[in-house]
Image (cartoon, rainbow, N blue to C red):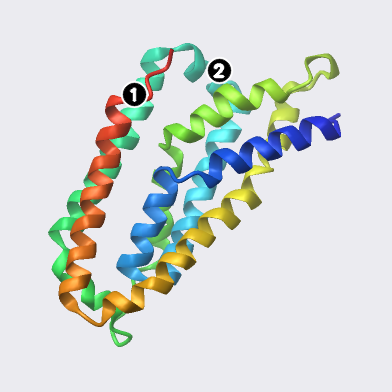
């Protein structure tokens, strides 16, 4: 049902779109610096699941609505932007307490909570809607029929690519984290800058990327 050309084409497209830093990557890097490797990887899992929900929604017809309705697209974009800005504000508010996350005697951030936050970032990520609502349908073979099934199968390609790419970013960030742990001031600075970066990203998403 799905040709090798369809699979290869969408795989290359996924790799390019996912590997380029966006909301998911910046979120995972922020989690890695603030809470460490385990929290970052849990965030990656939640984020990938959220993005896959977007892919399934596209296959079931929601993606077509997002693609055709500027209002729906704007609502989704603003929800994602607002959530990232809220996370940034929280990071700035609690920047001086980030040192506790580096103390092995302190209970680490719950994996379920980290995954839930990652899920919300993934499901409201405008980049995911662009990939699956505007790009994915182009790789379906209309003549072969069963288009929703084709889209569902093709969307599975994004799972391993997202896990590998985002995990690589998280592991790289957590490796640098130990240098900041030697100084509470450094860590507070990272928390503040990370928060400002998330707020800036949220504002960027809110005021750019309008659907033509």
* Quadrant housing the N terminus: top right
**Image location (x, y in percent) of residue 29:** 39, 58
The furthest residue to the bottom: 105
The answer to whether residue 117 shows anywhere in this view is no
- Residue positioned 56% across, 24% down in the render: 133
Q: Is residue 112 above or below residue 212?
A: below
The quarter of the picture where residue 64 lies is top right
Q: Left of 42 or right of it: where is 140? A: right
Comparing 212 with 176, the one in front is 176
**Image location (x, y in percent) of residue 168:** 53, 61
Q: Which mark is residue 23?
A: none
**Image location (x, y in percent) of residue 16:** 59, 40
The answer to whether residue 128 shows anywhere in this view is yes
Look at the numbered disc 2 and give the secondary structure of its residue.
helix
- Residue positioned 48% across, 19% down in the render: 66
Q: How far apart are the two marked residues, 2 and 1, measured between alpha carbons?
A: 15 Å
Q: Which mark is residue 64?
A: 2
* Quadrant housing the C terminus: top left
- Residue positioned 33% across, 85% down in the render: 104
Look at the numbered disc 1 and give the secondary structure of its residue.
helix
Task: Please tell me which of labels 2 and 1 falls first in the chain.
Answer: 2
- Residue positioned 17% across, 77% down in the render: 184
Q: Left of 92 or right of it: where is 54? A: right
Q: Left of 29 or right of it: where is 49? A: right
Disc 2 residue crowd, few under 14, some 14–19, many 20+, Cα 10 Å: some
Comparing 111 with 185, the one in front is 185
Q: Is residue 139 above or below residue 86?
A: above
User: Residue under circle 1?
Assistant: 75
Disc 1 residue crowd, few under 14, some 14–19, many 20+, Cα 10 Å: some
Comparing 71 with 189, the one in front is 189
The quarter of the picture where residue 114 lies is bottom left
């Amino acid at each position: 049902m799905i040709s090798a050309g369809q699979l290869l084409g969408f795989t290359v497209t996924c790799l390019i779109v996912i590997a380029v830093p966006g909301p998911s990557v910046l979120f995972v890097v922020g989690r890695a610096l603030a809470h460490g490797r385990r929290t970052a990887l849990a965030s990656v899992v939640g984020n990938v699941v959220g993005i896959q929900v977007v892919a399934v929604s596209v296959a079931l017809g929601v993606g077509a609505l997002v693609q055709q309705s500027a209002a729906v697209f704007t609502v989704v974009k603003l929800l994602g932007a607002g959530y990232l800005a809220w996370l940034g504000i929280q990071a700035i508010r609690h920047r001086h307490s980030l040192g506790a996350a580096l103390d092995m005697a302190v209970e680490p951030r719950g994996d379920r909570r980290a995954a839930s936050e990652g899920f919300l970032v993934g499901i409201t990520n405008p980049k995911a809607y662009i990939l699956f609502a505007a790009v994915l349908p182009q790789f379906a073979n209309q003549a072969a029929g069963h288009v929703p099934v084709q889209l569902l199968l093709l969307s599975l390609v994004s799972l391993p690519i997202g896990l590998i790419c985002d995990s690589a970013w998280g592991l790289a960030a957590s490796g640098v984290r130990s240098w900041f742990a030697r100084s509470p001031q450094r860590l507070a600075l990272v928390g503040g800058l990370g928060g400002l970066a998330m707020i800036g990203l949220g504002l960027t998403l809110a005021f750019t990327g309008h659907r033509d």
